[in-house]
Amino acid sequence: MSEYAIEAEKISKVYRLYDRPRDRFLEAINPGKRRSKDHYALTDVDLKIKKGETVGIIGTNGSGKSTILKIITGVLSPTSGSITVNGRISALLELGAGFNMEYNGIENIYLNGTMMGFSRKEIDERLDSILEFADIGEYVYQPCKTYSSGMFVRLAFAVAINIDPEILIVDEALSVGDVFFQSKCYHKFEEFKEQGKTILFVSHDLSSIAKYCDRVILLNKGIKLDEGCPKEMIDAYKQVLVGQYKVTDDSEVSVEDLSRMSSEASAAVNPDALEYGTGDARIRDYYITDRNGTRTTAIIKGEEFTIHFSVDFTADIKAPIFAFTVKNIRGTEITGTNTMYEKAFLEPVKSGDTKTVTFRQRMDLQGGEYLLSFGVTGYEQDKFQVYHRLYDVLNVTVVSDKNTVGYYDMNSQIEVK
């Protein structure tokens, strides 16, 4: 018997793209004249997942992560290559797919269970567990079309997670519902790990990848770049984000392949950021570097990082103040500082000057997504002036495998005697 739960060899998925809808029809009636172009969602991807492993797949948007999961689960067929799956799969891909909105919750549980290959007796045995996990009360007897979106995904998740699979495949499904339901989902996920089940999941939550995975696979533009321990792959992913990923001598990725993969560093910049000011100063070239000096959008909790920006001045200013602020995605200001608070720069500048500002610190925020804002302000005859402000202009991801309560970590040294 194979030691592998999933084996995929040279998997490619090619879609035909047409400039105009009628080109599809014209090509169908005249196959000799090609009117489409090929788009490779996956190119010769090899995967081997051992039984009992928890493996994560990371990559930028459009890298083929969801496509490979759909091929493994049989939702899609590969254009070329072979796939072997040893074990019963439960897939959390598109929650609620196959639900009939006219049926009530109970009817949809039996409908989905049957589609997954379970007998009515087997579904009967799991019904109480499903209802307890979903926890939507008497609504389970109402048509699904009357459910809120939160109730719907709770029921769909409960059905998928409670069928006792040998292989669990998850695509960004661990963040459904409210915070209490999410906690329940992660607890179930940990139970599966403890039971030695095979887990393959895709997530943009790098903290979850670091915490749960034994191994991580990095994809970009349909090409498998590398695989290895979570920390190494997260570091490589950060390089991909800013177009600084390097091909090693033993890599299966060719330079030609890499040249087809565009940088997505701009994905961290908010094109709709609010900005205003007098125009006497202009903030530009804002970015973050990690402890190695590499530009990145993801920082590992506990490590040193640096915020950089440059400022061009178009007027003489007596004492400009340079600042940054960190908000969570709900808009709450978490922390920040400026050169006045830090007594770091109390000098005048001249029109035409350019100043480069760096703030270096350790990352003690909890794992998650944050937004950075920048500002150049000052006082003129005791009147506060804003020369240039950029609100929520940069996204930064904090990667953590240990979160505590609240916004930041106290880094407590604990002793129990």
Image (tube, grey):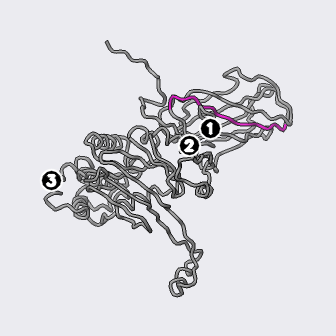
How far apart marks 3 and 2 lie (CA) works out to 46 Å
> For mark 3, what is the residue?
125
User: SS for tag 1?
Assistant: loop
Callout 1 touching callout 2 (CB < 8 Å)? yes
Mark closer to the observer (3, 1): 1
Q: Is residue 380 left or right of residue 254?
A: right
Task: Judge whether residue 308 is colored magenta.
Answer: yes
Q: Quadrant of residue 338?
A: top right
Tell me the magenta residue range. 301-314
Q: Give, as a three-letter code, the residue at label 3.
A: Glu
Q: Give, as a three-letter code, the residue at label 2.
A: Lys
Q: Earlier in the sequence, mark 3 or mark 1?
A: 3
Task: Judge whether residue 223 is colored magenta.
Answer: no
> For mark 2, what is the residue?
238
> For mark 1, what is the residue?
294
Q: Is residue 110 above or below residue 251?
A: below
Q: Is residue 15 above or below residue 183?
A: below
Q: Earlier in the sequence, mark 3 or mark 2?
A: 3
Q: Position of residue 353 (x, y in %)?
A: 83, 34
Rate crowding at label 1 as few (under 14), some (14 to 19) or many (20 or more) other CA atoms within 10 Å.
some
